[in-house]
Image (spheres, rainbow, N blue to C red):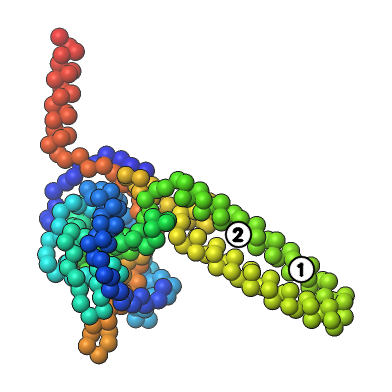
């Protein structure tokens, strides 16, 4: 879903441990990732953010223990400009597997771009309406699977004052948003769907064979049971392999109808996972060099809208007024 919007001026799970891997051709990685970055730039969207305890989080037990949520609507723009400060370019989560190593960070030439808030979010607490201050951050994409054209989408924004509702507290720090998207490729998606259907049929056939082998072995004495056990072992391994392949396809491809994924179409032939997670960074290890990301809630893409600058809107209105006057002559 897309709508037109004028850009407004602003005041300007378990623990996930991120250990990046070194690559030998960073320029090539940049080129690959820029393929999707070029499609996202200047995109504006609305996000529904829900801060609160989710299964598997590594936040302290007392944090959001009541099950309450802190929700707000956040609108952002993924800009084409470089991010605001050098400090932002050192975020290893955004640099991804292709741009960082365990001990060093390779500063990318143009892989990290700015992401800006377009509104000042609000929420209701016992004290009434509260505003949440949000400042500029950065975003990046990294290729996860070239065949599926699956990309990881990660970005962060700074929340310098945080927010609190009951026992749910959004820390006053940098908050990371983690999701994924695809460059749409209908033929590739159709092949994946066809393969998925074949594997499902194969699983059903294997299950029927298992039942038949078990029934037959019960009526053939000791020798029959021994033969049945061997056949059962082979069929169980086939079943495990087919189930593994199904899971891989579900993870790599956007199969909304089959796998129950929630998806949202974006601009420039992009397809987004509708839901993602938000996290805070914690440093662990003897030297404090091991990064861990603790989930503090979820977010969902609500809609995308086109960016029309104010000057363009004013020119269009002026043109319409002139046309109206001409019609009246």
Which element type, helix, strand or loop, lies under badge 1? helix
> Image height check: is 43 above or below 133?
above
Residue 328 visible in image: yes
Q: Which mark is residue 211?
A: 1
The furthest residue to the bottom: 286
* Residue under label 2: 199
Q: Nearer the viewer, residue 247 or 1?
A: 247
Q: Position of residue 30 (x, y in %)?
A: 24, 60
Mark 1 neighbour density, 10 Å: few (under 14) some (14–19) many (20 or more)? few
> Image height check: is 290 above or below 89?
below
Q: Position of residue 82 (x, y in %)?
A: 15, 57
Q: Position of residue 191 (x, y in %)?
A: 51, 51
Q: Residue at horizontal 35%, vertical 45%? A: 269
Mark 2 neighbour density, 10 Å: few (under 14) some (14–19) many (20 or more)? some
Horizontal side of 250 relative to 118 (left or right) equals right
Which badge, 2 or 1, comes first in the chain's sequence? Answer: 2
Residue 165 visible in image: no
């Amino acid at each position: 879903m897309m709508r037109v919007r004028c850009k407004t001026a602003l005041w300007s799970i378990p623990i996930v441990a991120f250990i990046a891997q070194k690559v030998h051709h960073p320029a090539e990685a940049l080129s690959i990732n820029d393929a999707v970055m070029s499609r996202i730039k200047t995109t504006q969207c609305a996000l529904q953010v829900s801060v609160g305890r989710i299964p598997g989080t590594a936040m302290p037990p007392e944090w959001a223990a009541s099950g309450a949520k802190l929700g707000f609507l956040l609108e952002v723009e993924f800009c084409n400009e470089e991010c605001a400060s050098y400090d932002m370019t050192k975020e290893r989560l955004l640099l991804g597997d292709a741009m960082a190593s365990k001990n060093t960070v390779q500063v990318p030439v143009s892989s990290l771009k700015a992401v800006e808030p377009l509104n000042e979010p609000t929420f209701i607490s016992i004290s009434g309406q509260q505003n949440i201050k949000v400042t500029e951050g950065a975003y990046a994409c990294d290729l996860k699977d070239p065949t599926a054209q699956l990309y990881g989408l990660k970005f962060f924004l700074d929340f310098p004052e945080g927010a609190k509702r009951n026992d749910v507290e959004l820390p006053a720090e940098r908050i990371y948003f983690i999701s994924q998207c695809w460059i749409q490729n209908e033929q590739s998606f159709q092949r994946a769907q066809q393969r998925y259907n074949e594997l499902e049929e194969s699983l059903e056939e294997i299950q029927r064979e298992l039942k038949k082998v078990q029934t037959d072995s019960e009526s053939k004495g000791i020798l029959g049971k021994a033969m049945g056990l061997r056949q059962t072992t082979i069929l169980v391994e086939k079943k495990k392999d087919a189930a593994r392949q199904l899971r891989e396809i579900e993870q790599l491809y956007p199969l909304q109808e089959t796998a129950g994924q929630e998806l949202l179409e974006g601009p420039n032939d992009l397809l987004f996972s509708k839901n993602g997670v938000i996290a805070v960074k914690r440093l662990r290890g003897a030297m404090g060099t091991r990064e861990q990301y603790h989930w503090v809630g979820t977010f969902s893409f609500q809609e995308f809208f086109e960016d029309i600058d104010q000057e363009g809107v004013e020119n269009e209105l002026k043109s319409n007024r002139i046309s109206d006057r001409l019609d009246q002559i």
